[in-house]
Image (spheres, rainbow, N blue to C red):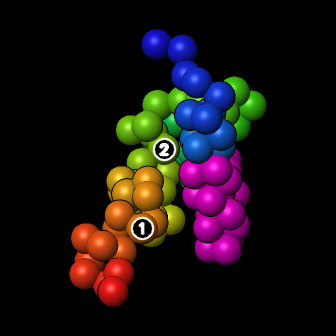
Amino acid sequence: MKPKPEQREAFDRLLDEVLRRGQELDLDGKTMAKRLPISAETLSRMKRRKNGDFATLDALGRLVGLRLAYVPDDDALETIRKGEFF
């Protein structure tokens, strides 16, 4: 299945966050790739294409202390669910 533009944007934002967190921990992309292990080329391809395997993205995130999670798409709905709307 070919990813939609909004899916590419979401993937790109997530990957950017993972890489930013890696930099904060003094881990560059090449080091992160070695620790998984994936090739540096795979990581480069993920960045360039704004697409890739979510299992790899998840593993990269966990390497820097992040995890993937679904959140409600509607802030008002989430506020109501928490009982904080009124």
Q: Which mark is residue 26?
A: none
Determine whether 2 is above or below 45 in the image: above
- 2 vs 48, left or right, is left
Determine whether 25 is above or below 54 in the image: below
Residue on which the image places disc 1? 76
Please give the range of residues in magenta: 13-30
Q: Is residue 3 magenta?
A: no
Tell me the kind of residue under disc 1: Ala
x, y percent for residue 58 = 42, 48
Residue drawn at (35%, 81%) of the image: 85
x, y percent for residue 32 = 58, 52
Tell me the kind of residue under disc 2: Leu
Residue drawn at (52%, 36%) of the image: 38
Cα distance between the residues tagged 2 and 1: 29 Å
Residue on which the image places disc 2? 57
x, y percent for residue 6 = 61, 35
